[in-house]
Image (spheres, rainbow, N blue to C red):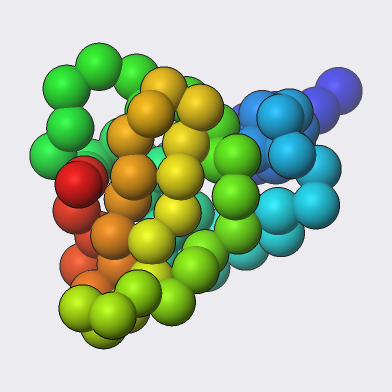
Amino acid sequence: MANLLDVQKQAWGAVNPLVPFNPDAAMCKAWMARKVGYSGPVGVPVSDETPVDEGGSAQAFSSGVVLHWTGGDQVEAS
């Protein structure tokens, strides 16, 4: 029997299995908690985290939402 973390890991890699699942990373924590200030489902990642000029990193999701990590556990939808 799978636990919730196993199921979340499967969902995380559903579109792009090359995107690493790291439940300790801020982006993954925000995705698992669904507490990132967006409306509607965020979907699953289609890209790995990419450094951005504004600082931190961004990651695209299948719904079209882009999450932006700005440091620590700060993740926002953009």
Residue 58: x and y in percent read 38, 61
Say if residue 72 shows up in the picture: no
Q: Position of residue 71 (x, y in %)?
A: 26, 80
Q: Residue at x 41, y 23 (%)?
A: 63
Percent from the top left, x then y, of residue 61? 47, 36
Left or right of residue 12, residue 37 in this image: left
Q: Residue at x 74, y 39 (%)?
A: 16
Quadrant where the image shows the N terminus: top right
Q: How many numbered circles does the render carry?
A: 0
**Residue, x 80% and y 52% (percent of image)?**
18
Q: Quadrant of residue 32?
A: top left
In the image as oriented, which residue stretches furthest toward the front?
A: 53
When asked about the image quadrant of residue 35, the answer is top left
Report the residue that reaches farthest toward the right: 1
Q: Is residue 18 toward the left or the right of residue 45 in the image?
A: right
Q: Residue at x 19, y 53 (%)?
A: 76
Q: Going by the image, does 45 lie left or right of 70?
A: right
Taking the image as drawn, is residue 58 in sight? yes
Q: Is residue 26 above or below residue 66?
A: below
